[in-house]
Amino acid sequence: MQIYDIKEMKSYPYAERDKNIFYKCKEFKTRIIELPSGGKMPSCEMASYVIFYVITGTAEVSVNYEKAAIKEGQCLIAEPGTLSMETQGGVKIIGIQIEKVSG
């Protein structure tokens, strides 16, 4: 068992996003995503499901070019596909990437 203080956790810019992974196992990996006011996460292709939980702030998330606004306390579950994110006032999110299970 491990406990993390998410609100106090330091985050790194998108270019160093691998440093934001704070837990990883073969089934999933968990990272902090923090964007400043006016910040954007560029489009990326995800082969797995991703769960986003907003810790603070708001963001507009695009999943396969369908947009949705999420705010503090909300959770979005995205199917595999093209994802992007932007924020006007800043946002801090937990992102949980579920590894694809081969069957």
Image (tube, rainbow, N blue to C red):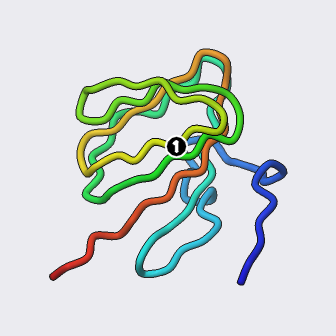
Residue 8 % position (x, y): 84, 51
Quadrant of res 4:
bottom right
Location of mark 1 (residue): 75
Rendered residue at 61%/43% (across/down): 93
Residue 78 % position (x, y): 35, 46
Q: Amino acid at mark 1?
A: Cys
- Give the tally of numbered discs: 1
Q: Quadrant of the N terminus?
A: bottom right
Rendered residue at 54%/26% (across/down): 59
Q: Quadrant of the C terminus?
A: bottom left
Closest to the observer: 17 or 88? 88
Residue 25 vertical position relative to residue 64 in the rendered view, above or below: below
Closest to the observer: 60 or 37? 60
Quadrant of res 37:
top right
Closest to the observer: 80 or 70? 70
Residue 3 vertical position relative to residue 70 in the rendered view, above or below: below
In this rendering, position of residue 80 left or right of residue 52? left
Rendered residue at 23%/34% (across/down): 64
Residue 20 % position (x, y): 62, 56
Closest to the observer: 20 or 88? 88
Residue 26 vertical position relative to residue 18 in the rendered view, above or below: below
Residue 32 vertical position relative to residue 54 in the rendered view, above or below: below
Residue 84 % position (x, y): 38, 33
Residue at the limit of the structure toward the left, as seen here: 103
Q: Residues within 10 Å of mark 1 (few under 14, many from 20)?
A: some
Callout 1 secondary element:
strand
